[in-house]
Amino acid sequence: MDDALRQQIGRRGALALGAGALASSPLWAQSLVDLGFSENDGRRPLTDAFPGKTGMILQRTRGPLLETPMAAFDGALSDDPATPNDRFFVRWHYADIPLAVDAAAFRLHIKGAVNRALSLSLDAIQSMPAVEIAAVNQCSGNSRGLFGPRVPGAQWGNGAMGHAVWTGVRLADLLDRAGATGSHVKFAGLDQPPGDAPWFAKTLTLAEARSRDVIVAYGMNGVQLPLLNGFPLRLIVPGYYSTYWVKALDSIELLTGPDTGYWMEKAYRIPTAPRASVVPGAKDFPTAPIGRMLPRAFFTKADAQAVRGIAMGGDAGVAKVEWSIDAGKSWHAAQLGRDHGQYGFRRWAAVLPRGSHTVAVRATNVRGITQAADPIWNPGGYMRNVIETAKVTV
Ligand SMILES: Nc1nc2c(c(=O)[nH]1)N[C@H]1C(S)=C(S)[C@@H](COP(=O)(O)O)O[C@H]1N2
Ligand SMILES: [Mo]
């Protein structure tokens, strides 16, 4: 692995958030952004108050919900699509998050249905073969604020997502070392629930967990994970919504059956109906745990200078991005930036004819799955991948 990264993690014994950083929201915001919701107020302050983060949209202070402004994703076609760590979104369910982690004392526990229970130091993990993978981390509820009718939960715009290059070890290698048996793998971190609330824990099947692409990461864009993004270790499940990407990961437990806990049985469930969509207000419908992501294309700039953005394929690579200025009657291929791997962002740009247009943009992945214009609805506000539009005069 990268020696500089190893030294950095070894050297920094503990990280701490500045005292009071999480205590209160700013009284006056220097500037407001408007997320443009139709059914509720989309104005939010920008904040620099969180350690390691600058210019973030403040959604909630405790536990922190910080959104990335779309402008932070913008760039020329040839620019690296990685989201800088200091602009990368942050989401914790509970207020009691790790504010300091002693890297020397930290242990990752692998337990339950295993032949050898393990308790691994960061040094032990970093002495295993390292792998790198570029992948988009996207909240299941990204874009929830755009749902109509409104649904409860964090009112995110489109910025509860980011692309990073993650460095770590394959989960399968760790499972082999422990002699994993059973059928499911449950992941939990250092953050603690209030009172009797259930510990935040997510579970994959053993087959999903053994995928080559699933890693336990200690590096993010070439440096150690920021504390707010899960220092010292987090799970990376490329192609899956980030509810499974457990941060400050310290417990991997092999189960002999499905996880019947709150975070799998009650939360993060989607309708089994096509596009995870039901009639607004519907209640009794079959559900399944949320899983794989869908293709999406976003504008990062739409003005007289440039019409461009980023796209993702969801759980497969981006095959094409297309734009339309006639309400979807005809579609034209956008230019694509370099392919940074099937799970990453792909930059796109469009050259439009002169005039005033409403531009629509859609991504199609290599499985042939594409975006649709008609909205979806579900009570969790999950899996929005509706075609985005922007008004522009060229
Ligand atoms: N330990 C822990 N891991 C967690 C969460 C959490 O609350 N606790 N939230 C999950 C959810 S819902 C999201 S969207 C992502 C956010 O990752 P980020 O903060 O690095 O952007 O972390 C996931 N991992
Ligand atoms: Mo999330």
Image (cartoon, rainbow, N blue to C red):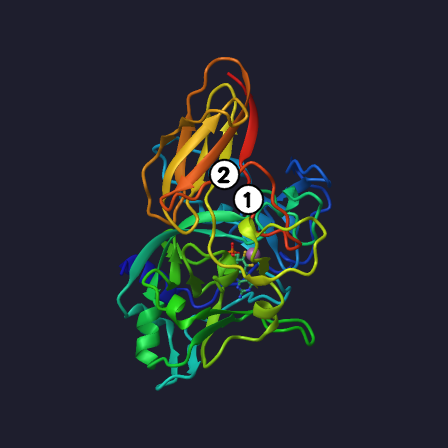
The answer to whether residue 52 is above or below residue 360 is below
Q: Picture quarter containing residue 22?
A: bottom right
Q: Amino acid at mark 2?
A: Ala
Residue 349: x %, y % from top left:
41, 28
Tell which tag, 2 or 1, sits nearer the viewer.
Answer: 1
Q: Tag on residue 284?
A: none
Residue 347: x %, y % from top left:
40, 36
Return the residue at label 1: 159
Q: Is residue 389 left or right of residue 363?
A: right
Indicate the secondary structure of the residue bearing disc 1: loop
Q: Is residue 259 left or right of residue 29?
A: left
Indicate the secondary structure of the residue bearing disc 2: helix
The answer to whether residue 184 is above or below residue 380 is below
Tell me the residue at 64%/55% (across/down).
Answer: 380
Residue 107 seen: no
Q: Residues within 10 Å of mark 2 (few under 14, many from 20)?
A: some
Residue extending farthest bottom = 115
Residue 4: x %, y % from top left:
30, 57
Return the residue at label 2: 72
Of pointers 2 and 1, the one earlier in the residue sequence = 2
Q: Quadrant of the N terminus?
A: bottom left
Q: Amino acid at mark 1?
A: Gly
Q: Are marks 2 and 1 in contact (CB under 8 Å)?
A: yes
